[in-house]
Amino acid sequence: MASIYCCTECGTNLNLSTAHLFPPDFYFEAGNKGTLSFAAIDPTKFKLEKEDKIRPFFETVNYWGIQRNRTKIKCNNCGKLVGYVYDDGPPLTNSPGQYHFGPSQVIPRAPRYRFKTKALKITTET
């Protein structure tokens, strides 16, 4: 019995494999509430769009904003936003990290494709 993940807007099969699905209790720094996280996706089914956003945050005179760089995942068929790409997946190396404190953001990490559960229609096939 396999799950089929479709876009809620247009009903297109997004070809997401449950074999690449992270377990629900897997820890991510960006969180995972209301989302499903995959290690790999089919690039023909999605458009990836870079987003650079600066939010005003006035702490001192010299510090005036928080910059967020992320990539939007959109359905290739209808263009609906279905999730984001984060770089907080498992470390790409077996290095103990800087000063042997364990894996950190200094160590390159695999991308994590985080889909909103509201943007996916999940059905099972027997």
Image (spheres, rainbow, N blue to C red):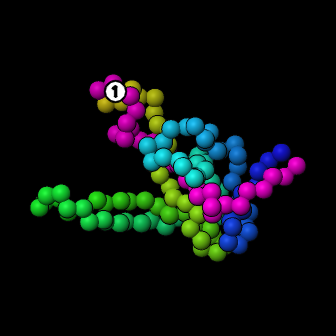
Q: Which residues are magenta?
A: 99-126
Kind of residue sitting beneath label 1: Phe
Q: Which residue is mark 1?
A: 101
**Side of 123 where 93 appears, left or right:** left
**Side of 32 where 117 appears, left or right:** right
Q: Position of residue 70 (x, y in %)?
A: 43, 59
Residue in the foreground of this view, choosing between 81 and 90:
81
Q: Position of residue 90 (x, y in %)?
A: 50, 38
Label 1 element class: loop
**Side of 1 where 69 appears, left or right:** left
Residue 77 lies within the magenta run: no
Of the 4 image quadrants, the one containing the N terminus is top right
Q: Position of residue 106 (x, y in %)?
A: 34, 39
Residue 114 lies within the magenta run: yes
Residue 43 seen in render:
no
Q: Residue at x 29, y 26 (%)?
A: 99
Q: Could you classify mark 1 by the number of other residues whose Cα lies within 10 Å: few (under 14), some (14-19), or many (20 or more)?
A: few
Q: Residue at x 78, y 56 (%)?
A: 123
